[in-house]
């Protein structure tokens, strides 16, 4: 499971959050923790995804990349 960084940036813009540092502070986590959460090399835990989604008032499914769809398209 990976987070959709593009979607998160859109949500940040809607809430007028200018930086990851600002978002991290609002979430009560370090900038490094947020950076790891958004990294393609990091597998976020469910509670972090839920917390981030709740902050933005959306479903966790709205910020998760669907890797299965990409794989299906590549294999067909």
Image: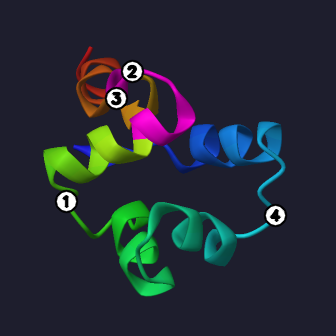
Cβ atoms under marks 1 and 2 closer than 8 Å: no
Which percent across, then down, holds residue 59? 39, 21
Q: CA distance from mark 1 to mark 3?
A: 14 Å
Q: Position of residue 46 (x, y in %)?
A: 16, 44
Give the secondary structure at mark 4: loop
Of the residues under marks 4 and 2, which one precedes in the sequence?
A: 4
Q: Nearer the viewer, mark 1 or mark 4?
A: 4
| Circle 1 or circle 3, nearest the eye | 3
**Distance between the alpha carbons at the discs numbered 4 and 2:** 22 Å
Q: Which numbered tag is attached to residue 18?
A: 4
Q: Which residue is mark 1?
A: 43
34, above or below 11, in the image: below
Start-end of magenta stretch: 53-61
Q: CA distance from mark 3 to mark 2?
A: 4 Å
Could you say which disc has been placed on residue 59 in the image?
2
> Quick one: label 3, few (<14), some, or many (20+) residues within 10 Å?
some
């Amino acid at each position: 499971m990976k987070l959709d960084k593009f979607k998160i940036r859109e949500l940040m813009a809607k809430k007028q959050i200018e930086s990851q540092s600002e978002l991290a502070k609002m979430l009560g986590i370090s900038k490094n923790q947020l950076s790891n959460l958004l990294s393609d090399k990091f597998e976020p835990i469910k509670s972090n995804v839920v917390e981030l989604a709740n902050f933005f008032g959306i479903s966790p499914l709205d910020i998760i990349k669907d890797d299965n769809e990409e794989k299906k398209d590549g294999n067909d």
